[in-house]
Image (cartoon, rainbow, N blue to C red):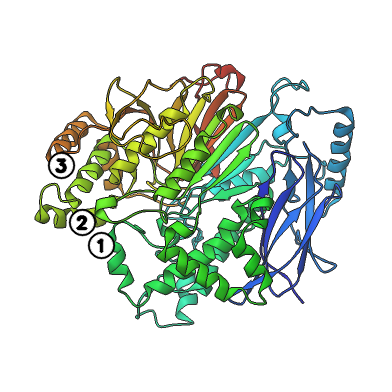
Amino acid sequence: MAGLRLGPLLRYVDWETGSTATVWVEASRPCTVEVRCADGAGGTAPTFSVAGHHYALVVVDGLTPGSTTAYEVLIGSRRVWPPEDSRLPPSTITTPLAPGATPTAERAAGDDASSAADSRAPGGPADGRAPRGPADRGGSGAPDAPSGVRVSFGSCRWAAAPGDGNDPVGPDALVTLATRLAADPAAERPDVLLLLGDQVYADETSVATRRRLAARRDLDEPPGTEIADYEEYTYLYDESWRDPEVRWLLSTIPSCAVFDDHDVIDDWNTSAAWQRDLRATPWWHERIVSGLMSYWVYQHLGNLSPAELDADPVYAAVRAAPDGTEVLRRFAAEADAEPTRTRWSYRRVFGRVRLVMVDTRAARVLAEDRRAMLDPQEAAWVRSAVLDDPSSYDHLLIGSSLPWLLPPLIHDVERWNAALCAGVRGSRWARFGEKLRRAADLEHWAAFPDSFDRFTELLREAGSGPDAPATVCVLSGDVHHAYITEPHWPKGRRTPGADSTPGPRRDPAAGSGTTSGEAPTARILQLTCSPVHNSVPRSIRAGFRFGWSRTGRRIGRALARHGRTGRSPVEWGREGGPWFGNQLMTLTLRGRNAALTLVQATAGAQGAQLEAVLERSLTLEDEAIFGHSTEC
């Protein structure tokens, strides 16, 4: 008899119609999975098989726009979710109102009926309250009040639970958020959760996972205690998603994800020399193929809309095959060998908010004479995704697992190191630069100077003109602390190669190496939040703080002179932070107003709790969101 092995995860909710969603599950055997909603919506999907595991991504149709409805998961006629003994609230799908629609008395009555149905579901709240969704955020409660979008984000979650109850890195922010929301089903929830990389750690396994690895192979042989193949990757997702509170949270809050290095290996695709060294090992091919296969199954598929899924030839081939393993293996091997054949980046829309999630790992060009964060096709796609139809959004969010703007000293060190590796100071300095690049993890946007400059100019363009959005926010993680920084465009500063990528808003007559245009009218910010559950040594904390200091800036300028790197097209200062701890940021976007909250998970006598350490408006009309916020 087939059962539910993992999930469900609510992944995609359609903000254009408010009537469609996708739910991901892993079953124990081949079967047909059904999602059945309290309001009559639903969908079914047969499982597809990969490496002895069975998955389904169910498209749920017929949802009521502007509502919250409970759902169940069935295999055959047997309900497998929620569990019979669940103490958690029902899993729900919250949909926005369709564009231009307003709440009506009939819809309100329907919501009341849905809430009553929710209260009768096993494990449901006794008072039948429904959680607050997008349509509830109109501030005044008037039918024509603008609804808001709440976007929570973070990265770097080492999911292993401590065996003795004493967590050396502190409470898990995602578990703490789940516990808080489960305890108060009527509390305001995020509309979407952005997981910005390192959802699993293939190179840093827990004691429990190592025991499972040791039961199937000799850990004295490479890759040792790291993940070797697809089956072992499934152990990581089990560990990350099986916690009861997290499992419930991911079944209720839609999520978007993108990988970072630890999803595969530390410093993945740092350089061409790094890649050559790894490809020469006997275990790497299986590791990278399995890493991309598992990412496609567990994370990437849920990032896509039903229309994108229908158009995906790999998804069609895997579903059509009795066993999709070899189809997916070929795809993953080709994606590693020829990155231009695959696009992991994607775009999502949440009302008047546009999200562009950018792959900053697999799409790199590593040859020193053409080094780029994004290959030309990927860069052109990102440019189009950002600049297309600018009048359709009020806020632009760009998800980049790696921060665009770092503490200035670290930025200058990476730019200097890139120049050394390119040979600006000769072969001896180039060899030193490569060793330093690997030892110090110098592989963020600043380590790809041309890409940094082009990306910076792209953000300036996105934030300029009569249709400019109110805010452009780059959302990142990776660096195990949180901070806010805001760039400024010095007038007349030259932007090397800024216009060398074709796309919308570009003057075809413009050459590369142009002078940057006027400063943008939108507020452009780097918002960095990491980790969700991890740590950073005190020495590294001190280094990050020093990176913002005046002395650090002076050292950075000296390195720039030595590396002949020239000046960056922008300057920036610290607007908030650094904050250290397990944490999540939340953007609340309503109309052209924006506000930011940072919460940290702290241990207390009553257990872990989320403590707000920052509540700040990002736009002038702060009273619309935070009556007590502090301006940057």
- Give the amino acid at mark 1: Ala
Q: Nearer the viewer, residue 580 or 596?
A: 596
**Secondary structure of residue under mark 2:** helix
Q: Which mark is residue 424?
A: none
- Cα distance in 3D space between marks 3 and 1: 20 Å
Residue that badge 2 annotates: 434
Q: Residue at x 57, y 36 (%)?
A: 354
Residue that badge 3 annotates: 563
**Cβ–Cβ below 8 Å for labels 2 and 1?**
yes
Q: Position of residue 511 (x, y in %)?
A: 32, 33
| Residue 192 vertical placement versus 243 (above, below) | above
- Give the amino acid at mark 2: Glu
- From the viewer's perspective, is the residue at label 2 or at label 1 nearer? 1
- Cα distance in 3D space between marks 2 and 3: 14 Å
- Cα distance in 3D space between marks 2 and 1: 8 Å
Q: Residue at x 70, y 55 (%)?
A: 23
- Give the amino acid at mark 3: Gly
In this view of the protein, can residue 440 be seen by the observer? no
Residue that badge 1 annotates: 273
Q: Residue at x 43, y 54 (%)?
A: 260
